[in-house]
C-alpha cells in the first residue's frame, strides 16, 4: 500500500473515530438522568455543617526549607513522609511532630513520594525520570545522605507520582511525563508492565497522577494532561479498561472513592469530578461558585465515609472541604486559624481517617483533625 | 590483432571522470556501444515514514474497535441515578471521624422543609430561593436543567427563574490584562479565545516566546531542551522552560516549580 493510500485510510479512520466518539458522548449524556447532588437533595439529605472550631490545625510540621510537593501517610503508626523542593525527604511522627529521618536526595527536583505498606521504605521520583527507593533502616551520614537501595530506571520523562500497590512491598506504580505508567518489581528493579506509550492505546500527554484501588489492587486510575482519566487493569497493560472524559484541562490528581467503585479527580479547569468506574458515568461536578478565573485543583482526598472531599487549589491557601453528596463547599481550611500561607500542593488522610495532612509551598505541613464535640446517639 | 575490449575503452572513459562524454574519437571505442550515462541513484522507499503512517492507521483502527465495543457496552449500562443511590447509601452507612454531629432542625424551618420538596415546582422554587430558608436548605444551583440543550452547559447560578442555559461564551470578551504565568490571556475564560496580540503585552522575566515573530497563544515551540536536561512538567502555551544544565542551583523548570 502506498503512503498516499495510507494517508487516505488515516483520514477516513480519523473521521470514523470522531463520529464514534460523538455517538458515545451523546449516548452517555442520555444516561445522565441526575447527579449525586440532585439525587441527595431529593432524598432530603442533611447538609454537613462545620462550626468554627470543628476542624482545627493541631500540628504544624516545620523543617523543610522549600516548597512541599508531596506527602504520604503510613498505613499505621501515624508517620508521614514529605518531599520538598529543598531536595529532601523528611519522615515525621505526626503525633509528636518529630522528624525521624531527613534524607538528602541525589536529585533535588523531586515531585512525589510514597511509603511502602510495611512502612520500612520510602520511594520518590521527579525530574530525573527515576523512582528511587530508600530503606529507613539504613544509616545516614552526617549530611543526611542515605544510600539508594533501588533505582527504578526506564521512564523517558519525569516521574510525577508513585504509589505502592496496597499490601505489596514489592510492587509500585509510577506515572510519568512520558505518557506512561509503569508497574515495577521493586526487588529486581525491573518493569513488570508498561501502560500506554507510543503506538499503544493510552494517554496522549503527560500522566500526572495515579491512584490504586484499596479494594481491588489490580485496578488503578491515572490522570493526565490530555484531560482524561483512565482505568487500568494491571494484568492487562495493552489498553485502558475505560477512559473518562469531561474535564477541560489537565487532570492533576486522582483518588479512589472509599467504596472502590468510584473515583475523584481534580483538574486545571478548576473542578473536581466524581466518576463511576463500572459504568463510566460522571456522577458529579464540584465547581466553586464565582465569576473569577478557574483555579486549578492541585490535590484531593476523600474522608473515610466519602462524605467529605478535601481539595487543594493553586491559589493562596485555599483548601475547600466539599460535601460530596450535596455538592457544596462546607469549609475553607485556608480561612481557618493557623492556616497555610501559600498554595496547598498535596494532602492526604491518615489511615484511620481521623486526621488530614496538608503540604504547602510555604514549606510546612499541617495536620487537621476534628476538634468539636460529637454527640453519641 | 583485435581491438581492445570495452574495458580498455572504459578505462579511458573512466579517466574522463564518467562524465558520459567523449568516446567517439578514441580509436579503441567500439562504435556500437552507447555512451556511458550516469544513472540517478535508485529511489529508496521511505520505509520509516510509511511504517510510521501504517502504525498510526493501525492505532486508529484499533481505537475504532474499542469505541464500537464501548458503544455496545453503554447500551446495557444502568442510568446514573442508580450509581448516585449507591454513593449516597455508602456514605450514609459509614461513620466519619471528621464530621461533626448533626444539629437539630429549628422549629421555624420545619414548615419550609415540608414545603420545599424536590426542587421541580414553582412553590419549591420560591422556597428554595428565599434567603430566610437558612436551616439545612440552601438555594440549589438551579431548579431544573433538563431543558438545557447546550452540551456541557449548566444553569446559571442565581437564575433559578430562568431555564435558559448558560452556554459557554462564544468569544473572548477581551484581554485587558495578561497574566505572565502562561504568557497568554489568562483572564480569558476560554483559553482557545486567546489571540496573539494579547501576548505581546506580557513581559516575562524568563526567556519566552516573545522573540518569536510568529508565536501565537496556542502554538509555541520555543521549548529549549538539551539531551541532558529535564523535560519540564506542564510546559504549555507559550511558556518556555529554560533548562540550564550548567548551573545546577537554578530551577530548571520555570512553571510548576
Image: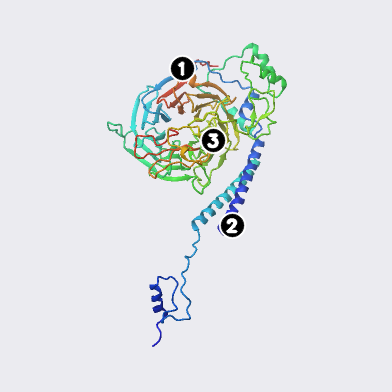
Tell me the element at label 2.
helix
In the image, residue A81 above or below residue B10: above
Give the numbered dot on residue B197.
Answer: 3
Q: Residues within 10 Å of mark 3 (few under 14, many from 20)?
A: some
Residue located beneath label 2 in the image: A5
Q: Nearer the viewer, residue B46 or A368?
A: B46
Q: CA distance from mark 2 to mark 3?
A: 40 Å
In the image, residue A58 above or below residue A280: above
Tell me the element at label 1.
loop
x and y, in percent, of residue B119 in the image: 68, 23
Q: Quadrant of the C terminus of chain A?
A: top right
Q: Chain of mark 1?
A: A
In the image, residue B156 above or below residue A236: above
Q: Earlier in the sequence, mark 2 or mark 1?
A: 2
Q: CA distance from mark 2 to mark 1?
A: 67 Å
Which residue appears at 62% of the width and 12% of the height?
B106
Residue contact at pointers 3 and 1, CB within 8 angstroms: no
Discs 3 and 1 carry the same chain letter? no
The nearer-to-camera label among 3 and 1 is: 3
Is residue A74 in sight in this rendering? no
Pick out the residue farthest to the top: B108
Pick out the residue farthest to the bottom: B1
The image quarter in which residue B109 lies: top right
Q: Chain of mark 2?
A: A
Q: CA distance from mark 3 to mark 1?
A: 44 Å
Total numbered badges shown on the rendered structure: 3
Tell me the element at label 3.
helix
Q: Nearer the viewer, residue A343 or A46?
A: A343
x and y, in percent, of residue B134 in the image: 62, 15
Give the numbered dot on residue A337.
Answer: 1
Q: Residues within 10 Å of mark 1 (few under 14, many from 20)?
A: few
Amino acid at each position: 500500500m502506498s503512503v498516499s493510500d495510507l494517508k487516505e485510510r488515516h483520514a477516513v479512520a480519523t473521521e470514523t473515530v470522531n463520529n464514534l466518539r460523538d455517538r458515545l458522548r451523546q449516548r452517555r449524556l442520555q444516561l445522565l438522568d441526575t447527579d449525586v447532588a440532585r439525587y441527595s437533595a431529593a432524598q432530603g439529605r442533611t447538609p454537613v455543617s462545620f462550626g468554627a472550631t470543628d476542624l482545627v490545625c493541631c500540628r504544624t510540621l516545620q523543617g523543610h526549607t522549600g516548597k512541599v510537593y508531596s506527602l504520604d501517610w503510613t498505613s499505621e503508626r501515624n508517620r508521614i513522609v514529605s518531599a520538598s523542593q529543598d531536595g529532601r525527604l523528611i519522615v515525621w511522627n505526626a503525633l509528636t511532630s518529630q522528624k525521624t529521618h531527613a534524607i538528602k536526595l541525589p536529585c533535588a527536583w523531586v515531585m512525589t513520594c510514597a511509603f511502602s505498606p510495611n512502612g520500612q521504605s520510602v520511594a520518590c521520583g521527579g525530574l530525573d525520570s527515576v523512582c528511587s527507593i530508600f530503606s529507613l533502616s539504613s544509616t545516614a551520614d552526617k549530611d543526611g545522605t542515605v544510600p539508594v537501595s533501588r533505582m527504578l530506571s526506564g521512564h523517558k520523562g519525569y516521574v510525577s507520582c508513585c504509589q505502592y500497590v496496597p499490601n505489596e512491598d514489592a510492587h509500585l506504580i509510577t506515572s510519568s511525563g512520558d505518557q506512561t505508567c509503569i508497574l515495577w518489581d521493586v526487588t529486581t528493579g525491573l518493569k513488570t508492565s508498561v501502560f500506554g506509550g507510543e503506538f499503544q492505546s493510552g494517554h496522549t500527554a503527560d500522566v500526572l497522577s495515579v491512584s490504586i484501588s484499596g479494594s481491588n489492587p489490580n485496578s488503578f486510575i491515572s490522570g493526565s494532561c490530555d484531560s482524561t482519566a483512565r482505568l487500568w487493569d494491571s494484568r492487562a497493560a495493552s489498553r485502558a479498561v475505560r477512559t473518562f472524559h469531561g474535564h477541560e484541562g489537565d487532570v492533576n490528581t486522582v483518588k479512589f472513592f472509599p467504596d472502590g467503585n468510584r473515583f475523584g479527580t481534580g483538574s486545571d479547569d478548576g473542578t473536581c469530578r466524581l466518576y463511576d468506574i463500572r459504568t463510566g458515568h460522571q456522577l458529579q461536578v464540584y465547581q466553586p461558585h464565582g465569576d473569577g478565573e478557574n483555579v486549578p485543583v492541585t490535590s484531593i482526598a476523600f474522608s473515610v465515609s466519602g462524605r467529605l472531599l478535601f481539595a487543594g487549589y493553586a491559589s493562596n491557601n485555599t483548601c475547600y472541604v466539599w460535601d460530596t453528596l450535596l455538592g457544596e463547599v462546607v469549609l475553607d481550611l485556608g480561612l481557618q486559624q493557623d492556616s497555610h500561607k501559600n498554595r496547598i500542593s498535596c494532602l492526604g488522610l491518615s489511615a484511620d481517617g481521623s486526621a488530614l495532612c496538608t503540604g504547602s509551598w510555604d514549606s510546612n505541613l499541617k495536620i487537621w483533625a476534628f476538634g468539636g464535640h460529637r454527640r453519641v446517639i | 590483432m583485435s581491438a581492445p575490449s570495452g574495458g580498455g575503452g572504459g578505462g579511458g572513459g573512466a579517466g574522463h571522470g564518467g562524465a558520459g562524454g567523449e568516446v567517439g574519437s578514441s580509436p579503441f571505442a567500439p562504435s556500437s556501444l552507447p555512451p556511458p550515462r550516469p544513472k540517478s541513484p535508485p529511489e529508496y522507499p521511505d520505509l520509516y515514514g510509511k511504517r510510521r503512517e501504517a502504525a498510526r492507521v493501525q492505532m486508529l483502527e484499533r481505537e475504532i474497535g474499542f469505541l464500537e465495543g464501548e458503544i455496545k457496552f453503554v447500551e446495557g449500562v444502568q442510568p446514573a441515578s442508580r450509581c448516585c443511590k449507591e454513593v449516597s447509601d455508602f456514605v450514609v452507612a459509614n461513620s466519619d471521624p471528621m464530621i461533626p454531629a448533626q444539629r437539630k432542625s429549628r422549629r421555624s424551618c420545619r414548615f419550609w422543609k415540608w414545603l420545599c420538596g424536590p426542587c421541580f415546582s414553582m412553590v419549591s422554587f420560591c422556597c428554595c430561593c428565599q434567603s430566610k430558608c437558612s436551616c439545612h436548605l440552601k438555594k440549589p444551583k438551579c431548579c431544573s436543567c433538563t431543558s438545557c440543550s447546550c452540551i456541557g452547559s449548566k444553569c446559571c447560578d442565581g437564575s433559578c427563574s430562568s431555564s435558559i442555559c448558560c452556554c459557554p461564551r462564544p468569544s473572548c470578551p477581551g484581554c485587558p490584562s495578561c497574566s505572565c504565568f502562561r504568557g497568554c490571556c489568562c483572564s480569558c475564560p476560554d483559553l482557545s479565545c486567546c489571540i496573539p496580540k494579547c501576548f505581546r503585552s506580557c513581559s516575562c522575566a524568563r526567556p519566552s516566546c516573545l522573540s518569536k515573530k510568529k508565536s501565537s497563544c496556542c502554538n509555541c515551540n520555543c521549548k529549549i531542551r538539551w539531551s541532558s536536561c529535564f523535560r519540564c512538567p506542564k510546559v504549555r502555551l507559550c511558556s518556555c522552560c529554560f533548562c540550564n544544565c550548567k548551573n545546577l542551583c537554578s530551577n530548571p523548570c520555570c512553571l510548576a516549580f
